Image: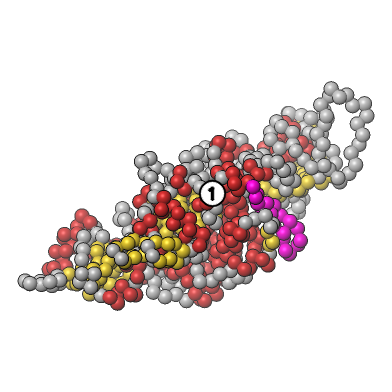
Amino acid sequence: MDLQHKIMNAFVGKVVRKDLAFLVKGGLPVPTYVLEYLLGQYCASDDEEVINEGLERVRLIIKNNYVHRAEAESVKGLIRENGQHRIIDKVTVILNEKNDEYNATFANLGLTGVPIGTDYVRKNPKLLSGNGVWCIVTIGYVAGQDVKVRWLIQKLKPIQISNIDLDEYIEQRQNFTTEEWIDFLVHTVGLNPDNLNRREKFIVLSRLLPHVENNFNFMELGPKGTGKSHVFQELSPYGVLVSGGDVTSARLFVKMSGNKEILGLVGYWDVVAWDEFEQQKGRATDAVLIDTMQNYLANKSFNRGKATHEASASMSFVGNTKHTVPYMLKNSHLFESIPTSFIKGAFLDRIHLYNPGWEIKMLKKNSFSKGYGLITDYIAAVLHAMRNTDLTSLLKNYAQFDGSLSERDHLAIRKTFSGLIKLIYPDQNFTDEEAYEIIDFAAESRKRVKDQLYVIDETFQAEPAKFEYLNVKTGVKRAVLTLEQIENDFLPQHERQVESEDIPSLPQEGKPATESKDTSAPQPKEEGHDPATPKAKQLASKYIEVRANQSNVSYKKLFGDYLASASHIVITDPYIRMAFQVDNLLEFIQTCRECCENDEELYIELHTQNTDEKIPEMIDIFDDLTSELAALGIQFKYFFDADHDRNICLDNGWKIILSRGLDIFDKFGRFSLGNVRQVNRRCREFSVTYVRE
């Protein structure tokens, strides 16, 4: 059974085809969760006829009930003529102290001061938040003279699921593999998982962490058009997206009205997301806001007026970067684009996770899901319910972090770990390997914050944190590195005085590699060595890991030094089958030509495998290649006898074991720099082991 059918069977009536909301929405400023609420009632099927009928029904509802601002007067007239009418609009409520009643304001219809029953407000306190709630409302009209109140709210229903069975949701997790469940969640947030690698999926799902964890402090900066604010704007009726330049202390925390304290956004929403959180000319940030914010991010409480208030709302900051990551690492820091008033160690140290938005490709038409995912209102209710579960204590069963980390470092890692477990393994059924995958991601996300703090605030350099942990299961220590640190050969300020063998680095093309001493075999004495002659590079047995999405990697960097003295090269890779895999082989052979310094004739031998029906086609390809290489003085032979092993054996005594064979690069476009040079490509996750035989 494929993933789409699994989804339909497991969550009957709770899923919708994700592209349908875009088909209905058009240019309407209606959140996706409003449309999917309706689509879930009429289009929760894989039957095209049912879907088409449902789409027409939803279009009709939007046409007849959604209030366009330009048509507000016509709708008012319709209500008067018919006596009542059902509308879809955003409703905000205030307390009218003079009349001792609650009054509603309709954003699009333009009505203000409409009395609303106390029961509606008690059941839906977010109506009082000042930001409004989308509702389906039946409005009545009272005609005649001497009528004090003409507009009546006869029925009001916020557009959100009233209740969910969390246990049922958790139980369904067992019907999916981890990869399927991750793809399912990516579909649910509206993106196409086929266009993302595993690391990119983790980055996308990390945007859900503020929704599933109380008081989670999240930041994502990256290029425009990568969907940073999409989850916060469209996903959940429990979150609110505000413009970073329009936030005030009163709006966010507490507004003073005489002697009364009116709670702000943090008191009503699970998530308050700051959009366009970047420097803007002519806008100054209130110092009181920053001080109050720092206290809230650290202590979950804030002081305004005479009282101390507590809240569980998570804070998310999303904005655009102005420069590339290499430029920022070299010339400034990764927080350079946020408002200057917030570039303070005391504020930034409270961020639990810095999501690398620059690793997500700009969204295009095929970036969006056309498959089935959970109705956003349903998944929002699930995430809201899971906020009450705390899994931070599970981390100690797997990792013990270095004592140099601050309590804020530990808390950030624990909260990220807890949130991702709830998202990906809600049944808490995961392997050790899956747990360490999340631990590494959580620790890296916090280290990204800490590395920049050493640049921004020198006081942090006095007590540097060593980001490594002891694997409780194996007793082995593991260093934590950010991907941008690895691929840009960047060493944080506090680490520059210390040599670390834990940093896996690749040699620069045209530069000697820095390697640890080879202890696998004694080195021969160099008899008659002329000091004027350049000394041969001392190669070492070693093991390196390359991370998903890592760039600045090439065959020359990986193999060049080891190929230098070889003349007979044996490649074993059972997956030289597809066109792009043959391209990999050609690029490796070209690397051999450039790097092999031996005067002997070059001999390359390939051991691969293929299906019986495809072998004749590959024989033709390899025969053509044999002829071409022969003209260049290279002997090439091939055999279809490989098993599952992938390695390169050299006649100079070295064996290079490849976890993925030559297929190490992620997909890249024809019209991209990656098509010209390997170092510009993103990699898949793989490892290489160099062994002297």
Location of residue 473 (image quadrant) = bottom right
**First to last magenta residue range:** 462-481
> What residue lies at 68% left-to-right and 64% top-to-bottom?
398
**Closer to the camera, 150 or 662?**
150
Question: Disc 1 residue type?
Answer: Gly
Q: Residue furthest left?
A: 145
Q: Residue furthest front?
A: 306
- Residue 492 location in percent, x, y? 63, 43
> What residue lies at 16% left-to-right and 64% top-to-bottom?
76
Report the side of 299 relative to 32 (left or right).
right
Question: Is the N terminus in the top left, top right, bottom left or bottom right quadrant?
Answer: bottom right
Residue at mark 1: 345
- Residue 448 location in percent, x, y? 58, 49
**Closer to the camera, 286 or 497?**
286
Q: Residue furthest top?
A: 532
Q: Is residue 606 depicted above or below 293 in this figure? A: above
The colouring scheme, among rainbow, by chain, secondary structure or one colour, is secondary structure
**Closer to the camera, 497 or 684?**
497
Does residue 361 appear in the picture of this structure? no
> What residue lies at 63% left-to-right and 42% top-to-bottom?
493
Number of numbered discs present? Answer: 1
Does residue 687 appear in the picture of this structure? yes
> What residue lies at 72% left-to-right and 43% top-to-bottom?
498
Q: Main secondary structure of the magenta part?
A: loop
Report the side of 550 relative to 248 (left or right).
right
